């Protein structure tokens, strides 16, 4: 009976959360009309989410590119000519590695920070204070974060693409003994803009997931500092899982068409 | 002006409010007293639609809060002010920005006009020299006073005070009480305060209502309250440990 009750409660909470998220999305859509009035808030969020995340994203990308060059070289040896190393690394970075790893890093840094900030505002009645001042908190707090997520994630991924390929180039030249020209020719050889679009489309979807889930969890936090902690954890875990699932779905769409 | 009719609210198995009735006339300050956890703040949050009742209604100028559109509710909220228990000041803004936020978002006033009004309100509460400080840089009493300045920034018709003196030393608490009385006389607002501080209740209230076990068990003037023979009310006023109210 206890097991059935637990499952029932879990399903009920899931349905409630989906309903609450739907209501928030509806309010978010109506808030989009007021973007011009919220430009300052959006720019502030773009600085927080984008510019301040850049060093961490660049560091992650450099090592991701470097290790993918190592991995590629290891798998190619004796079977595939090394001049294709740049091709393999370039494709892997642009389609998968840069968008997904950047998104996971940003989910940990920005998604957690959004949930903690809004969660603290919720439990200290700051969100109630906005409501009673006639200010829609979804328009004031959530919309700038979501718009910023949609814009900044693709930008971060563009930087990540470049730095990851440079990281791979450094390894290819210094440790695999490939010339930089050979490696970069490999990158260019089968480069396709559709791959880049796919990566950037994924980044946009991931940006939406991170900002929306972070905001949703923070917005619905309750129970003081412990509740804020729970909301932050849920924001990171839910975003990360949704990033991986949506990445699979988007990859399926891309590779089947 | 504010009329609460048959309001009931439960959270899970816990019934917090049971058929609560309360009317507050224009220009009057009603104080709802009751023990911690008796549902005073929940009652206050119903008045501006922050919590939805299970049954019953809150009417403002004859119009039910529950039946208002979002826009109508926002209009009611814009002409209201709320002093939250913890102040609920925005951490990332200075006191001046906190007080001016409602004006910046809801009016077409220039930045200079907004700053002038916010500075004036902060001056009323004795915080003119702290306008550029952040909430984390000032004391609890100053935060409460800044929150009061924010609550009255839009010249509200209605002000709700949630535990205005809780957590303050007696001198600061008395200062807040004086401010509330002064603002009532200056702005002629209709107000509801919830508190368990009887000094504050007698000082600021035209009328006192007591909430006990989810119901209003007393509703009358301060003099009526003092002379009442209701054992629950008398024990609460005197703070006796002996009586129907048990120590929790």
Image (cartoon, grey):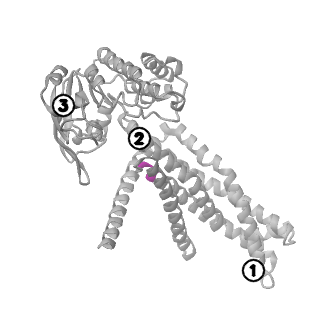
B169 up-or-down from A100: above or below: above
Query: Which of the two residues, A254 or A123, is positioned nearer the viewer here?
Result: A123
In x, y percent, where is residue B122?
A: 45, 20
Q: Which residues are magenta?
A: A215-219
Checking the image for residue A127, the label placed there is 2
In x, y percent, where is residue A189?
A: 75, 71
Dividing the image into 4 quarters, which one contains the N terminus of chain A?
Answer: bottom left
Query: Which of the two residues, A64 or A226, is positioned nearer the viewer here?
Result: A226
Dividing the image into 4 quarters, which one contains the C terminus of chain A?
Answer: bottom right
Give yes or no for residue A51 being in the magenta stretch. no
B230 up-or-down from A118: above or below: above
2 and 1 marks on the same chain:
yes
Do the residues under discs 1 and 3 have CB atoms within 8 angstroms?
A: no
Identify the residue position indicated by label 3 in the image. Answer: B233
SS type, badge 2: helix
SS type, badge 3: helix
1 and 3 marks on the same chain:
no
A18 up-or-down from B209: above or below: below
Circle 2 packing at 10 Å, graded few (<14), some (14-19), many (20+), is: many
Q: Residue at x 41, y 41 (%)?
A: A127
Mark 1 to mark 3 CA distance (whole Å): 83 Å
A87 up-or-down from B151: above or below: below
Identify the residue position indicated by label 1 in the image. Answer: A75
Mark 2 to mark 1 CA distance (whole Å): 54 Å
């Amino acid at each position: 009976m206890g097991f059935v009750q637990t499952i029932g409660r879990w399903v009920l909470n899931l349905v409630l959360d989906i309903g609450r998220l739907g209501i928030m999305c509806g309010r978010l859509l109506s808030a989009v009309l007021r973007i011009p009035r919220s430009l300052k808030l959006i720019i502030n969020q773009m600085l927080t989410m984008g510019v301040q995340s850049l060093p961490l994203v660049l560091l992650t990308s450099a090592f991701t590119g470097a290790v993918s060059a190592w991995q590629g070289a290891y798998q190619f040896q004796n079977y595939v000519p090394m001049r294709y190393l740049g091709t393999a690394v370039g494709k892997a970075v642009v389609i998968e590695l840069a968008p997904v790893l950047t998104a996971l890093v940003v989910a940990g840094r920005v998604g957690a920070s959004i949930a903690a900030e809004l969660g603290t505002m919720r439990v200290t009645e700051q969100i109630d204070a906005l409501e009673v001042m006639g200010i829609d908190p979804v328009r004031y707090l959530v919309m700038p974060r979501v718009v910023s997520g949609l814009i900044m994630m693709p930008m971060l991924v563009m930087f990540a693409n470049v730095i990851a390929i440079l990281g791979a180039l450094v390894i290819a030249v210094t440790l695999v003994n490939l010339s930089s020209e050979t490696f970069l020719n490999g990158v260019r050889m089968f480069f396709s803009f559709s791959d880049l679009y796919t990566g950037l489309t994924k980044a946009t979807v991931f940006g939406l997931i991170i900002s929306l889930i972070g905001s949703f969890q923070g917005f619905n936090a309750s129970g003081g500092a412990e509740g804020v902690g729970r909301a932050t954890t849920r924001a990171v875990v839910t975003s990360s899982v949704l990033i991986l699932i949506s990445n699979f779905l988007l990859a399926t769409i891309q590779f089947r068409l | 002006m504010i009329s609460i009719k048959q309001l009931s609210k439960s959270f899970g198995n816990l019934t917090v409010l049971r058929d609560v009735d309360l009317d507050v006339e224009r220009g009057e300050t009603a104080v709802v007293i009751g023990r911690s956890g008796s549902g005073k703040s929940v009652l206050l949050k119903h008045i501006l639609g922050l919590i939805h009742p299970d049954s019953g209604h809150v009417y403002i100028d004859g119009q039910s809060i529950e039946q208002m559109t979002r826009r109508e509710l926002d209009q009611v909220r814009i002409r209201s002010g709320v002093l939250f228990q913890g102040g609920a000041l925005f951490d990332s803004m200075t006191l001046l920005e906190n007080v001016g936020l409602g004006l910046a978002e809801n009016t077409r006033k220039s930045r200079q006009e907004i700053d002038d009004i916010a500075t004036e309100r902060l001056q009323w509460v004795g915080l003119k020299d702290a306008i550029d400080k952040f909430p984390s840089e000032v004391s609890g009493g100053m935060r409460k006073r800044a929150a009061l300045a924010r609550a009255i920034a839009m010249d509200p018709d209605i002000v709700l005070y949630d535990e205005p003196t809780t957590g303050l030393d007696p001198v600061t608490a008395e200062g807040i009480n004086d401010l509330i009385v002064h603002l009532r006389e200056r702005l002629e607002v209709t107000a509801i305060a919830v508190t368990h501080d009887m000094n504050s209740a007698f000082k600021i209230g035209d009328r006192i209502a007591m909430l006990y076990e989810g119901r209003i068990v007393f509703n009358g003037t301060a003099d009526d309250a003092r002379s009442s023979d209701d054992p629950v009310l008398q024990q609460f006023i005197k703070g006796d440990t002996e009586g129907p109210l048990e120590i929790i």
